Image (cartoon, rainbow, N blue to C red):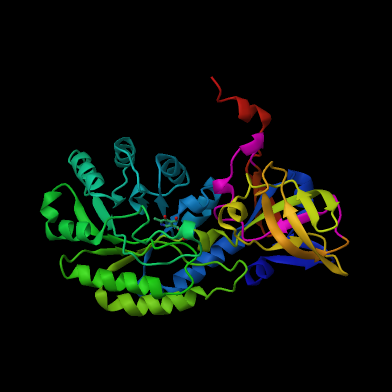
Amino acid sequence: MKNMKKYFNYHKGEGFIEGCRLSALAEKYGTPLYVYSEKTIRESVQRFQKAFSKIAPIIRYSCKANSNLHLLKILKETGCGADVISPGELTIALAAGFAPQDIVMGGVGKGEDEIEFGLKKGVSFFSVESLPELATLNRLSSKQKGEITALLRLNPDIAAGGHRYISTGKREDKFGLTEAEVVSVLKKPSDFPHLKIGGLHFHLGSQIDSPEPYLKAIKEAERLHKIYPFQFLDLGGGFPVTYDKEMAGIEVFGKAICGAVKKMGLQIIFEPGRHFIAPAGFLLTRIIYRKNRPHKRFLVVDAGMNDLIRPSLYEAWHNIRTVRELKGKKNSFEIVGPVCESGDFLGKERLLPDTIKEGDLLLIGEAGAYGFAMSSNYNGRLRPAEVLVTGKKSRIIRKRETLANLTEQFT
Ligand SMILES: Cc1ncc(COP(=O)(O)O)c(C=O)c1O
């Protein structure tokens, strides 16, 4: 796969990420282990910025994809702001150094206490998903000194995204305001005197494979802009990553979207998550047992659905390779975890060299987004450590959980 090949290489039969030998990382930090390539993150952001340079967008990295403090610091250095969904993500983003004015707070169910928390921390951009929420934000903003901007998240009833669970812009999805609701606000923004109605927000889905859904959303925005001349158009995230199917490059999206919005003269905002961080992250895991059955060969590895739930939850496909470069005949394997669920698998029917054995390491690719972020303690398992690779250097950026962590919250 294109992404994987670029940042993963074999050298003298040994797998490397950037200049770090994976078997050495496994030895030093243990497995399962999330490994991130700093170079990849920086390159993904730069390429995105270049693709959209004609419209100079505001880019707010969507922290839900991966909110490791140290990765956020890198994303801040590249010039991104942050899109947060909870006081928790906001706290990490602030700790990473994002200025409150570069942060937007979103989310379909922000409670009053959460909005208040955001305002107290100096956040001045909110994406709003219902009329009662808008009324609450207006009321709470009356106590604020600075201007508070509301972006109205419109549910445009547009189908987009790679799996039904990650489609967010269809009428039947829980997200956003209806068009009628948005129109009612745009026609009478004076009903919300303590807010600036800054514009529209769309997030159509994730893993969107062509610019078309964005272009439809832009058309919708163009129509609504005639009712009220708002300043911002936030087109959300959703830009794709190559897992199994080769996806269009970001330049294809850049060309189409820049062409469509340029004449509107709006300030465009994007909130990519997956596109920046998925290709930069890998899950390194060790084979505990090989079970040769008459009908199937299983590789039971030490990473499970609690570490990386995407295959179980979305039937997502991740590239899986051996860390040692093995030659010879290949066979089909089921790569499964130790969790007590038949749905606990990382890959099905994968062709791997038949000489593979217990103790060997496997590398799961494109695991940087919605990997660690969705991990859990299911089955009493400890969440893995995270390591950042920069050239030949590696450093731990999140400690592996301990058994003490599992019991310390009990009263
Ligand atoms: C509002 C919003 N913005 C941005 C994103 C990031 O999406 P992606 O990781 O596909 O870029 C999401 C993902 O769920 C989202 O809900």
* 315 and 362: which is toward the camera: 315
Q: Describe residue 366's horizontal placement relative to residue 196 as left or right.
A: right
Q: For the stretch drawn in magenta, what is the main secondary structure?
A: loop
* Residue 365 within the segment the image draws in magenta: yes
* 392 and 357: which is toward the camera: 357
Q: Is residue 401 visible?
A: no
Quarter assignment of residue 351: bottom right
| Image height of 360 relative to 341, above or below | below
Quarter assignment of residue 330: bottom right
Q: Quadrant of the N terminus?
A: bottom right
Magenta part of the chain: 356-383
Q: At x 84% / y 51%, what residue is drawn?
A: 291
Picture quarter with ligand 1: bottom left
In this rendering, the count of numbered labels is 0
Q: Give coordinates of residue 63: x percent, y percent.
A: 47, 51
* 407 and 181: which is toward the camera: 181
Q: Give coordinates of residue 213: x percent, y percent.
A: 39, 71
Q: Is residue 288 visible?
A: yes
* 23 and 335: which is toward the camera: 335
* Residue 331 within the segment the image draws in magenta: no
Q: Give coordinates of residue 37: x percent, y percent.
A: 63, 58
